[in-house]
Amino acid sequence: MRWRFLDSGDLDGAEQMSLDAGLMDRARETGEALLRVYGWSRPTLSFGRHESVRGLFDPDVLELENVGAVRRPTGGRVLMHHHEVTYSVTAPAPENERLKESYRRINAMLMAAIARLGVQVAAAPVSTPRRPGGAACFAEPSAGELVVDGRKLVGSAQVRERGALLQHGSILIDDDQPRIAELAAQPLTPALPAATLRACLGRSPTYDEVRDALGAALAEAEGEPSGLDADEAARFAAPHRARFSSAEWTWRI
Amino acid sequence: MSSIPADLRYTTDHEYIKATSDAGVFAVGITDYAQGELGDIVYLELPKKGAKFAAHATFGTIEAVKAVSELFCPVAGEVVEVNARLDGEPALVNTEPYEAGWMIKLRVTDAASVSALLDAAAYTKQLAGK
């Protein structure tokens, strides 16, 4: 499979989710896979696709605090995106490929990237089931997620639709997750502090360092990727913008 | 080894369809193999009673701990009942996929479309090919 690599930089939540959804369309159309790296133009809460957040967060309070809000096309629970590097993989998902296998392959690439930065991570063992809305995403690692000493460093989620998959996740540089509880209108289950690159390395790596480590890990695993024109990516994102920027989607449950 | 009851029909997307006591109405869910692949199921988004679907149309989404997938309608029909228990107990899809874990009951448009689906032997063969 031919791979591409794209650094989209900092954009708002609706634009980043539109790109992730649009690039699934591109994977379906072209048969190519893409590793995208991005950041957030302001601190942003992202909610899981089926997560119930109405009454838990107040859109007006978030706006006053200059915190964005967006609902992901993927599952899982609320995340605060701020000091992190976000990755997304969009790829064709052949019917005969097992879900766990694609998750494992992508996680192996992430582990190699993080090892390049000097941090040894492990894949979390199998855990118990939880409902969306139970607690925040980084509160508890689930099977296969990347952990350091049992604490989650990379939180990931996947969606499969019509022959394409999207897996995206946050590689934490610093732990902004306690802000979730500060912004919530009701008490949340106290979260185990997340692992961060800053804590692991004793310094904060730059966005560029993390991006380059991801690019190098991709090249090692799949061969040197081609780039992707940002305008082409934006064209695929365009049909999805209305959904991800609408309050009807973000605050639907 | 996944359970594949002999009296059901199956799709290549790992849904099953099962006759009910009401002729023409079939229960739809995902197979034991599919629930095992997805892992712990935490949420289902299912249609409302009265919704109509074409064969292979998406009738809902299912969220496991770390992945969201679509649910496909095995044959054309109208939803006559939705399994409300799954709202509070989505894990029934993991523990009893063919019994309490059914998702919707469908009044099928064309009875012949059900017999055209995979039988247990054909579905077993498909899984063996993996």
Image: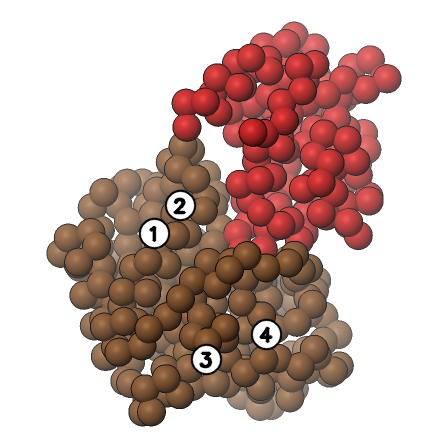
Chain colours: A brown, B red
Name the quadrant containing residue A204: bottom left
**Is A37 above or below relative to A172?**
above
Amino acid type of the residue that numbered disc 4 sits on in the rendered structure: Ala
Number of marks drawn: 4
Q: In this rendering, do the residues under marks 4 and 2 share a single chain?
A: yes
User: Looking at the image, do the residues carrying marks 4 and 2 touch, with CB atoms under 8 Å apart?
Assistant: no
Among the two numbered marks 4 and 1 on one chain, the one whose residue lies closer to the N terminus: 1
User: Looking at the image, do the residues carrying marks 1 and 2 touch, with CB atoms under 8 Å apart?
Assistant: yes
Among the two numbered marks 1 and 3 on one chain, the one whose residue lies closer to the N terminus: 1
- The kind of secondary structure element at disc 3 is loop
Amino acid type of the residue that numbered disc 1 sits on in the rendered structure: Arg
Q: Is residue A206 visible?
A: yes
> Disc 3: which chain?
A
Disc 4 to disc 2, how far (Cα)?
A: 25 Å
Q: In this rendering, do the residues under marks 1 and 3 share a single chain?
A: yes
**Is A247 above or below relative to A180?**
above
Name the image quarter holding the C terminus of chain A: bottom right
Which percent across, then down, holds residue A22?
39, 53
- Residue beneath label 3, please? A195
Q: Is residue A220 left or right of residue A158?
A: left
Q: In this rendering, do the residues under marks 3 and 2 share a single chain?
A: yes
Q: Residue B125 bears which disc, if any?
A: none
Q: Residue at x 81, y 33 (%)?
A: B81
Q: Residue A139 bears which disc, if any?
A: 4
- Residue beneath label 2, please? A101
**Is B24 above or below relative to A81?**
above
Disc 4 to disc 1, how far (Cα)?
A: 24 Å
Which percent across, then down, holds residue B22?
85, 17
- The kind of secondary structure element at disc 1 is helix
